[in-house]
Image (spheres, rainbow, N blue to C red):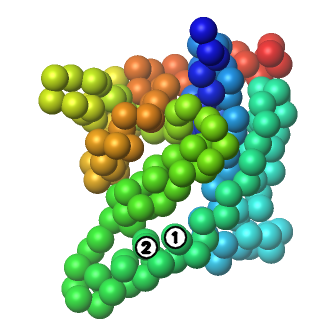
Amino acid sequence: MKELSVLVGLSGGVDSAVAALLLKKQGYRVIGAFMKNFSETKNKLTGECHWVEDKKDAEKIAAKLQIPLITLDFENEYKRDVIDPMFRAYAQGLTPNPDTNCNRYIKFPLLWKEAKKRGIDLIATGHYAKIKNTKNGFELWQANDKEKDQTYFLHKISQSDLQHTLFPIGDYTKAEVRAIAKKKQATCI
């Protein structure tokens, strides 16, 4: 039986780190993907763009988990499909949520496109949500941690996105995710 591979969006934060760890423990061949979407904000102390710091964190996590990490530059697509429409909506008096459009147009379809290009079977992120395969197709379900549930930000992703996506931390609370990360840090694999 072929070992399934999964491309995990690795942001440098605890949620995506634990998602990658859980998938590795489940026997997947895990590849991390850091997505550079926006580079116009800088840390006031270091002067570095925030994405540079986040990438360094993702690199440390990938090294600790002993998984490869690739960097994907989606900044042009993010500006075109998320930032520009957001400002047009503001000009019309609307209050859009850019996270929903990022997930719909950038994160899930472009991560999947990259996975297919590399022969990777699935994608995953550290979102607090669940996917269930029902008689009606793939459905987005709330995470166990109702306070951290992120289905609102994911409601625009398509059936085709859901069918090859995993949300490994959807069955966990934030406290449990932090405990897993703390334990992992203490054992260093």
Residue drawn at (51%, 77%) of the image: 79
Secondary structure under the numbered disc 1 in the rendered image: helix
Secondary structure under the numbered disc 2 in the rendered image: helix
Q: Which mark is residue 46?
A: none
The CA span between labels 1 and 2 is 5 Å
Q: Is residue 29 above or below residue 140?
A: above
Q: Where is residue 112 in the image (x, y as percent from the top left)?
A: 52, 46
Whether residue 97 is visible: yes
Q: Is residue 83 above or below residue 32?
A: below
Location of residue 43 by image quarter: bottom right
Is 67 placed left or right of 83 in the picture?
right
Most extreme residue toward the left is 136
Q: Residue 78 carries which label?
A: 1
Residue neighbourhood size for the residue with mark 1, other residues' Cα within 10 Å, grouped as few (<14), some (14–19), many (≥20): many
- Tell whether label 2 touches label 1 (CB within 8 Å): yes
Residue drawn at (69%, 39%) of the image: 32
Location of residue 51 by image quarter: bottom right
Q: Mark 2 points at which residue?
A: 81
Q: In this view, does 82 lie above or below 4?
A: below
Q: Position of residue 187 (x, y in %)?
A: 80, 13
